[in-house]
Image (cartoon, helix red, strand yellow):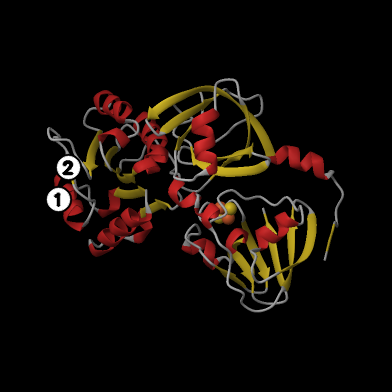
Amino acid sequence: MAFNFFKKKENKEDKKSKRYKELTVRQVINATADAIVIEFEKPEWELSYTAGQFLTLITDINGESVRRAYSLCTSPLVDEYPAVTVKRVENGKMSNHLNDNLKAGDKIQVLEPMGNFTTTVDANKKRHLIMFAGGSGITPMMGISKSILHAEPDSIISLIYANRNLESVIFKSEFDKLEDEYEGRMHVIHVLDDAPINWQGESGLLNEEMLQKILDRIPNWGNDQTQYLMCGPEGMMKNVEQYLENFGVDKANVFKESFVQGTIDKAEKKTGETAEGQEYEVTILFDGEEYKFPVPSDKSILETALDLDIDLPFSCQSGLCTACRGKLLSGTVRMEEDEGLSDAEKDEGFVLNCVGHPTSADVKIEIG
Ligand code: FES
C-alpha cells in the first residue's frame, strides 16, 4: 500500500486550505416547522456561484466530520447574501444537527459551490421554463427563478410544486411575492397530497393524470422554446420523466437535479457492498499528486482513499452530486449508481469515485 508524489509545487496544507473555505452564518430563518434557511455573510474570499448550484457544508458532529450538500436557494444576480435551505431528514445527522444547533455568528467549513443544475441566463432569450419540484427540491428552483425573472425579461416560468401538506410548503410567501412582482411571467401551481378543506389548488399525487391536467392549463410555447427542470423525490422525478417522454419531449430539453436531502442521506444508511471479485490497485491523479492504493471489493475508491487519509473531493457519497467525479484514463470501473452523470459525461469516460469499484488492474483516474 503506497502513495507518492510526483510534483512538489505547493505543500499539501496550502492546497487543502484552498479547497476548504469558511462561511459565517448571518441568520437562520425558520422556513417551515422542519426546515431552515441558512443565510451566510459575504466572505472575504470570492464566493462565485450560479443559481441552482449547491454548497457542501462540513462540520464536526460528536467527533465525526460530516459533510452534506445543500442547494443554494439564492440568486447571485439578485441576493446580497448566499443562502441554503436545510430540511430535517429522519435520522439525518447533518440536517438535524443544523436545525437544532446553528445560530447567527457560527462559522462553518464549506467547499466552493458546485453542480451542473444551472442554466445560462441571457437577456435575449425568450423561453418557457416548466419546473417540477417536490418538497425541499424547491431550493434550487428558487434561485433559478429569481435569476430568470430578473435577467430574462421575455422568459416565463411555470412552477409545479408538490408537497405533503400546506405546512410543508417551503417559500410559499416568497413565491406569492414573485407572482405579484412578475405578474404574467411567474405562475406557481401547488399540488398537495393532503390538502385542507378550503384548499383552492390541486390535491393528490403528481401522477400522469395530474400532470396532464396541469400541463393542459399552462401556456404552450412549443418544443423549441420550452425547457423542463425537475428536482424532488425519486418517485416524483420518475413520474415526471416518464410523462415527458410519453409526451414526446426531447430529452435534451429536460434537466434534473438528482440529489435532494432524502437521497443524500443514503450515505448514512449504506450497509456495505457484497464481496465481488478481488482487490485491484488504483492510481489517482489529483492536485499535482499521484496516489496508488489497492481498493478492496467491499469499498469504493473514495472510501478507500479516505481511510488512507487521502483528501479527495467529495460531497454526497451517493453517486448523485458529482463532486467526486474523475476521468477514467485507463482500466474499467463499475459504478453502483451513475444518476449524477450526464450521458455526455459518461461517454467522455467520467466516473464517480464515491460509488466506483475497480474491475481491472490498470485503473487510472484523473480528478479535476
Ligand atoms: S460525492 Fe457526490 S457523486 Fe460522489
Disc 1, disc 2: CB below 8 Å? yes
Tell which quarter ligand 1 is in.
Answer: bottom right
Q: Is residue 52 above or below residue 290?
A: above
- Give how far apart the Cα atoms at labels 1 and 2 are: 10 Å
Few, some or many C-alpha atoms within 10 Å of disc 1 (few <14, some 14-19, many ≥20)? few
User: Of label 1 and label 2, which has the lower sequence position?
Assistant: 2
Q: Measuring from the top left, give residue 236's x and y in whole percent.
A: 31, 53
- The answer to whether any part of residue 79 appears in the image is no
Q: Is residue 50 left or right of residue 165?
A: right
Q: Measuring from the top left, give residue 273's x and y in whole percent.
A: 58, 68
Dot 1 falls on a residue whose secondary structure is helix
Q: Residue at x 22, y 39 (%)?
A: 189
Q: Is residue 12 left or right of residue 307?
A: right
Image mark for residue 143: none
Image mark for residue 202: 2
Of 149 and 177, nearer the camera is: 177
The residue labelled by disc 1 is 213
Q: Measuring from the top left, give residue 94's x and y in whole percent.
A: 54, 40
Q: Is residue 8 left or right of residue 62?
A: right
The amino acid beneath tag 1 is Lys
Q: Is residue 82 left or right of residue 147?
A: right
Few, some or many C-alpha atoms within 10 Å of disc 2 (few <14, some 14-19, many ≥20)? some
Q: Residue at x 29, y 56 (%)?
A: 240
Q: Is residue 365 above or below residue 263?
A: below
Q: Measuring from the top left, give residue 24's x and y in whole percent.
A: 60, 25
Q: Is residue 189 above or below residue 297?
A: above
